[in-house]
Amino acid sequence: MTAARGGDLDQAVMYGEWALKNVRRSLPSLLMISRELAMEVRTRFSGSAQARDYLEYLDSLTRRR
């Protein structure tokens, strides 16, 4: 969230993906937190292809649950 709010999409996406791929994760709670990041990414970076890719990745994880 800090990276996204600071305008650093690359770092925000990197940390977001890392958190969701981490072996010792709690996917339900991480998905809840990732929704906050998704809102921030949509708000600040809506025109970015990288942002769209990240949001699609989150959507795919949500559909699997």
Image (tube, rainbow, N blue to C red):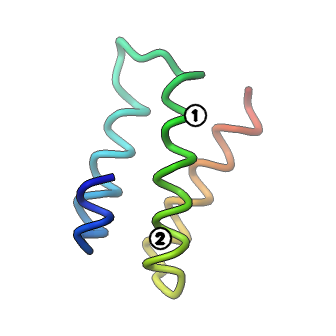
Q: Which mark is residue 9?
A: none
In x, y percent, where is residue 38? 53, 57
Numbered-mark total: 2
Residue beneath label 2, please? 51
In x, y percent, where is residue 22? 34, 24
| Amino acid type shown at disc 1 | Met
In x, y percent, where is residue 26? 48, 15
Q: Residue at x 51, y 87 (%)?
A: 47
Q: The C terminus appears in which quarter of the rendering?
A: top right
Q: Residue at x 38, y 44 (%)?
A: 17
Query: Local crowd at mark 1 within 10 Å, few (<14), some, or many (≥20)?
Result: few
Task: Tell me where residue 11 sits by quadrant.
Answer: bottom left
On the rendered structure, is 5 left or right of 11?
Answer: right
Query: Local crowd at mark 2 within 10 Å, few (<14), some, or many (≥20)?
Result: many
Q: From what the image shows, is residue 63 above or below residue 10?
A: above
Task: Tell me where residue 12 sits by quadrant.
Answer: bottom left
On the rendered structure, is 41 left or right of 16?
Answer: right
Q: Residue at x 26, y 74 (%)?
A: 7
Q: Which mark is residue 32?
A: 1
Which residue is more in the foreground, 28 or 18?
28
Q: Residue at x 35, y 12 (%)?
A: 24
Q: Are marks 1 and 2 in contact (CB under 8 Å)?
A: no
Alpha-carbon span between mark 1 and mark 2? 18 Å
| Amino acid type shown at disc 2 | Ala
